[in-house]
Image (tube, helix red, strand yellow):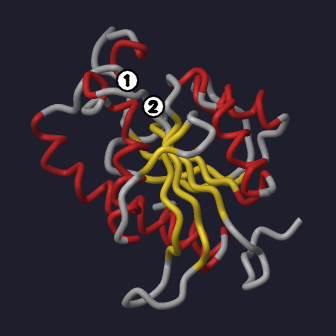
Amino acid sequence: MSTEPTSSDGVWLVVGLGNPGPSYAGHRHNVGHLVAAELASRMGSGFRPHKSGRADVVEGRLGGSGGVGGVRAVLARPRSYMNESGGPVSTLAKFYKVPVERIVAIHDELDIPFDTLRIKLGGGDNGHNGLRSLRKSLDSGDFHRVRVGIGRPPGRQNPADFVLSDYSSGERKVLPFQVDRAADAVESLLTEGLAQTQSRFNS
């Protein structure tokens, strides 16, 4: 199966994983929402409710220059909690007729240092409840992942508590640059393909 996009590939579904509501907005677990918001800004549009009622979406193009060209994409933020993300994503994939290999999940990753990215295709869920839900609902793990590093918790802090906590003051100064770079990686993945994007961003 080729992972390099072509002009005939059609629409991509780009999903920012997180938990809904303002009480979760600043958590490390919600970095996927932050990256999706940055991509929506680049599209020049805001999220709106999808008719399914299960997600908010933005339709447009990503990876163009000066608002011209680019690849058709649907950005999505499920309205469900992280561990139930798969249902809304599966519904959107069916609605827009997007095959699993053109789905991109943007998510936090404990096993990658903060301010670091990794892009991959397929794999396990590594204990991530959002990825586990996607794998179950899509009946496949063969979707792309933009893994945004948050690092391991300090000391003996429980990882579940760590991901559901706010970034430190020092991290918040760097976070906008990490979010911007993750959005760049998504656009690169859609327009330049997996191999070139990994070479550029998997540093």
Residue placed farthest to the front in the image? Answer: 51
Side of 71 where 142 appears, left or right: right
x then y, percent, for residue 89: 66, 40
x then y, percent, for residue 45: 37, 65
Considering depth in this image, is 58 or 181 the residue closer to the camera? Answer: 58
**Badge 1: how crowded within 10 Å, few (<14), some, or many (20+)?**
many
* Residue 178, quarter of picture: bottom left
x then y, percent, for residue 176: 23, 55
**Circle 1 SS class:** helix
Q: Give the label, 1 or 2, closer to the camera.
A: 1
Q: How many labels does the image show?
A: 2
Q: Nearer the N terminus, badge 1 or badge 2?
A: 2
Residue pictured at 43% horizontal, 50% vertical: 48
Side of 157 where 192 appears, left or right: right
Kind of residue at badge 1: Val
Label number found at residue 110? 2
Compared to residue 1, the image places residue 94 above or below, namely above
Side of 104 where 6 appears, left or right: right
Kind of residue at badge 2: Leu
Residue pictured at 57% horizontal, 60% vertical: 74
* Residue 41, quarter of picture: bottom left
Residue placed farthest to the right in the image? Answer: 1
**Circle 2 SS class:** loop
Q: Name the residue under label 1.
A: 163
x then y, percent, for residue 69: 53, 89
Considering depth in this image, is 103 or 10 the residue closer to the camera? Answer: 10
Considering depth in this image, is 198 or 99 the residue closer to the camera? Answer: 99
Residue pictured at 33% horizontal, 8% vertical: 156
Which image quarter holds the N terminus? bottom right
